[in-house]
Amino acid sequence: MTIRLDMTMSLDGFIAGPDDRPGQELGRGGGRLFDWLDDRFGDGPSGQVYAEAVATGAMLAGRRTFELAGRWGGDHHDGVPIHVLTHHPEPPSGNIRFSSDVVACAREAEAAAGDRAVMVHGAGAAQALLAADLLDEMELHVVPVLLGAGRRLFEGVGPAELRLDRTLADRDVTHFRYTVLHRES
């Protein structure tokens, strides 16, 4: 089973501009990071990448991302189960499950995804999965924007070795897919 981070980021490594909060979920200037989604239903590279992203069987997100996204209204895409990694779990609600244990959260998301990949959103979730050596791939959508400040995707992340598997360029974004090379036990 594949656990794949799917994140859009600025060229200088930010996934949101400064002061991200409810009502300004992507921070000041962060909305520009997602202009590439205008091409998500086309035949080009962004359409291909978007179709692959929504073909996943479960979602795993950090609590902060989940809340800032308005809990995705209970449905991130196609009714797939949403697994939230959090320090403050809640009882399950519909297709949403909460867990404070990164290993348990990842395993539950994998089981829920069946034979499809698990999509990961959020810097905190990505960092926890990397630290636990549970992240298999990273699909990074790099937008030619310099935000200069905000929330970094890889803040405080220890060393990891990656292999570039694919690069697809579109007019407003370059999509990179990396395989995370797992540590030897």
Image (spheres, grey):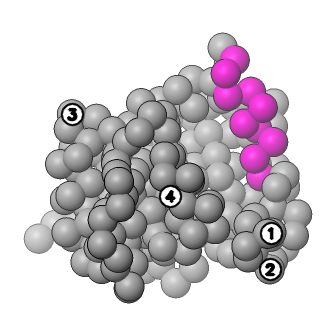
As rendered, which of 79 and 158 lies closer to the eye?
79
The local crowd at label 3, few if under 14, some if 14 to 19, many if 20 or more residues have their Cα within 10 Å, is: few
Whether pointer 4 and pointer 3 mark residues with C-beta atoms closer than 8 Å, the reply is no
Which of the two discs, 3 and 1, labels the residue nearer the N terminus?
Answer: 1
Which of the two discs, 1 and 4, labels the residue nearer the N terminus?
Answer: 1
Q: Position of residue 160 (x, y in %)?
A: 39, 68
The local crowd at label 2, few if under 14, some if 14 to 19, many if 20 or more residues have their Cα within 10 Å, is: some
User: How many numbered dots are placed on residues in this image?
Assistant: 4
- Name the quadrant containing residue 56: top left
Rendered position, 22 above or below 166: below
Which of the two discs, 4 and 3, labels the residue nearer the N terminus?
Answer: 3
Checking the image for residue 19, the label placed there is 2
Q: Position of residue 53 (x, y in %)?
A: 49, 36
Whether pointer 2 and pointer 3 mark residues with C-beta atoms closer than 8 Å, the reply is no
**Residue 160 visible in the displayed image:** no
Determine if the magenta segment contains residue 37: yes
